[in-house]
Image (tube, rainbow, N blue to C red):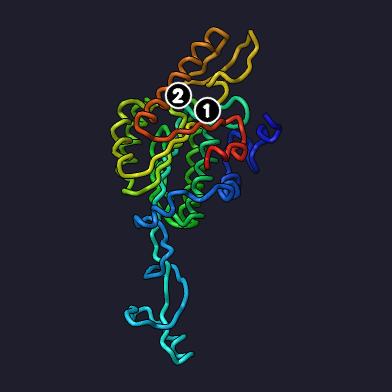
Amino acid sequence: MSESEHTLPLFADGVHLSEAELLACRDLARALPDNPVRARAALAGNRSSLLKGRGMEFAEVRHYQHGDDVRTIDWRVTARTGKAHTKLFVEERERPVLLLVDLKHSLYFGSTLLLQAVQVAHLAATLGWKAIQQGDRLGALIVSDNKRRELKPRTREQGILALISALTAVHQHQLQTLQQPSPDPAALMAQSCRQLARLTKPGSQVWLLTDGNGFDDECRQPLSDLRRHSEVSAFVITDPLRTGSLALPKHFSLPVSEQGQSLLLDRRSYDAWLQRQQHSLMQFVQMMQSLRIPVRQLDAARNLNQQLNLLR
């Protein structure tokens, strides 16, 4: 890997989360191409039309034509020029974008550069900034061990600033409660998937940002329902220690935390622990594939700006 891949993102320390580092994700979003569904969505009524009509965003003033709505006449320009002029507006057809942001305790793990939870927050902010830049409405369901925080889709800076504020607040609380017992991740994610399905309107873009832990058969039906009327994609955030890609010495003693319990792994117990981690990841990927939900993997050990090709 290049040295830049191991460099912390701007304003980040890898463990805590600040509004400044999530605001800086705006530059990552600018490097991403526009969503390829833009043209199709405009026809379906989900995105700002290139046609001019009634709406909220002013486009231009032109001479009044037969059939124009008299309510759109620009009386100032008409009085100044002596000829009737009418205002045209860009018809608003914004597409709702919903993020399921998984910040339960299993993501508070990191062996190299960032906690997986921090990488999830960076990814959520980047996708959020991109949605706002495209004129979409941004909302989220942020899942923590104690509750689920719902952000209804909002436009422009209101949507992204609400997301950034919620991410930093939830992350700080999760850091403070790491030693407390964790709830059943399967029950937590099943409830979250059902809530997400109820929140999402047809035609939305939905992103699942998670480590894949806790997604079992109880999640299948609400995700299937969601998939029928919305575009759903998933990102699973991994760590080298959990995928077995981190080089380790033959003999070691490695402290890790799992479900609120502290473990001390040697080579033999690490191999058993690693098998559980890989099995959980494989189950999630297989479920997404069976539901025809595209899934991509991002590494918490690499700076997100080195993995932008996976977001395109």
Give the residue drawn at x 39%, y 52%.
40
- Front residue of 21/175: it is 21
Residue 172 in the figure: left or right of residue 205 = right
Q: Which residue is mark 1?
A: 238
Q: Is residue 237 visible?
A: yes
Give the residue drawn at x 54%, y 49%.
33
Q: Is the residue marked by circle 2 packed among few (<14), some (14-19), or many (20+) residues within 10 Å?
A: many
- Front residue of 254/49: it is 49
Residue 98: give x, y in percent of width and height: 40, 45
> How many numbered discs sit on the rendered protein?
2
Q: Are marks 1 and 2 in contact (CB under 8 Å)?
A: yes
Q: Is residue 142 visible?
A: no
**Residue type, numbered disc 1:** Thr
Residue 138: give x, y in percent of width and height: 43, 51
Give the residue drawn at x 36%, y 31%.
188
Q: Which mark is residue 281?
A: 2
In this rendering, the answer to whether 267 lies above or below 255 is above
Residue 44: give x, y in percent of width and height: 34, 55
In this rendering, the answer to whether 251 lies above or below 196 is above
- Image quadrant holding the N terminus, namely top right
SS assignment at label 1: strand
Give the residue drawn at x 38%, y 43%.
231
Residue 43 in the figure: left or right of residue 299 = left
Question: In the rendered image, which quarter is residue 265 located in?
Answer: top right
